[in-house]
Image: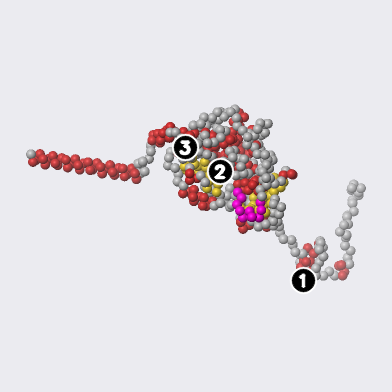
Amino acid sequence: MATQGIIAEGSISAKRRLAAVVVVIALVAVGALAMLGLLGRPSGTTIQARIAAAAAARPDSPVPVVEPLVLDTSNPDEARKRNAEIPFSTDPNPAARPFRFSGDTAARERAMDCLAAAMLYEAGDDPKGERAVGQVVLNRLRHPAFPKTVCGVVFQGQERSTGCQFTFTCDGAMARIPNPLAWARARNLAAGMLSGDVYKEVGYSTHYHTDWVMPYWSSSLDKVTAVDTHLFFRWKGWWGTPGAFARTLAITAEPVIGKLALLSPAHKATGTEDLFALPQLSGSLIDDSRAPMTISADLVGKRIGPGKLTAIEAGGNGFVMTLDKGGDPARYAEAAARLCAGRVQCRLLAWTNAAATPQGFPIEDAHLASMSFSYIRQKDSGVERMLYNCEEFPATPSIKCMTRRLPAAPARRLLADEQAEKMKVRLPDGLKPAADQKAGALTPVSRLEADKPRPRADARPAASASLAGTF
């Protein structure tokens, strides 16, 4: 019996040792998986299950309110730092469903040009950035918080001087006519996206901004991804999930956008009501329905749009500004639109170099070569020009480039003036004899040389016989 007890006891000890070994091996395996980053990473099946569960859920709050877009552009470096501190969301980022426009040919042309304008003006001639912007427009189109037409989404809030949803629609950027080839490329990309092309990287993002600005909503949304210098966001909670983008649209008509008339034949006036047009001159930056902004000396040094007011011309129709260096040059027109609203004549001269900015009128020629931006308007004569310094902004279309200004060379000092100065004699004003402009020292003329007859300055040579009487 004792032997049997010893054998039983040894068997139990062996089993315990084996169990301990198994536990140790399991712990080692778990640790190895954790080190390799494999543990806790959801499988494709898990991700799809999470997406499906989110889509099946119901809204946990009312439809979000779309507020006017307000950007802080005062400190680009600080904005980049703060944007980098906002972490990317770890939740799934599924691709949006393909969108296919179902309207007639006229509506499709208008939708395509509205989408192309958003893509090109917001992202430039860059296919990746343009498709990312286009996807945001289509995501908004499917979301109940936004208008129900492509043009309505793109030009939402364009009646404001600032705070529109897509800044190019209200900051004056559309005064720049894009390169025809870039416009054609943008239209092709827009046509593809209206036929089912999807830019997967941004998922269901409904917001974006460049990394050098800081919108008030950045920290309240989920940061989804980055495309070059643009950061993309979606709403938190159910309103950022695929279920919120289930709106089915049968768009039968798109509004005519007067601001696109110069670019798009589909948006030229047709006698129908323009739902978005502003009461202003055709193609003008200025809203003439607004009363002129009261601008007094106490505004000097204060921010107006993308810069600070530096000087005001007597009469209140001319302005000098110092613009934010490193900012978006397309936003400079925003300042002109605000300062010149309601004025029949107006000019804005602006510099990004604070040291080179003149502090008052008149502007000396020495300052003109470094000027960054200018806007001049004379309504009665139909003159309106917005120009950029293309050495500073090389991507500007050549038609919008300032003429390069070179400082005028100082007038040559005449020898007669130098001699008179030494003799302390003041010469009469007016033209000096041609001889005074010759190089070299002035030397006395002999009496014999002085007495020689000289031809009269206004004498004409005799006409030849063959030409006599012709004139």
Position of 208 with respect to 14 (left or right) is: right
Is residue 349 at least partly visible in the picture? no
- Name the mark nearer the viewer: 3 or 1: 3
The residue that disc 2 covers is 69
Q: Residues within 10 Å of mark 2 (few under 14, many from 20)?
A: some
- Image quarter of the N terminus: top left
Which labelled disc corresponds to residue 422?
A: 1
Which labelled disc corresponds to residue 289?
A: none
Position of 35 with respect to 202 (left or right) is: left
Residue that appears at 58% across and 28% down: 252
Above-or-below relation of 440 to 258: below
Position of 270 with respect to 456 (left or right) is: left
Which labelled disc corresponds to residue 61?
A: 3
Residue that appears at 51% across and 31% down: 247
For the record, the magenta segment spans 295-305
| CA separation in Å, label 2 and label 1 | 69 Å
Mark closest to the chain's N terminus, 3 or 2: 3
Above-or-below relation of 251 to 203: above
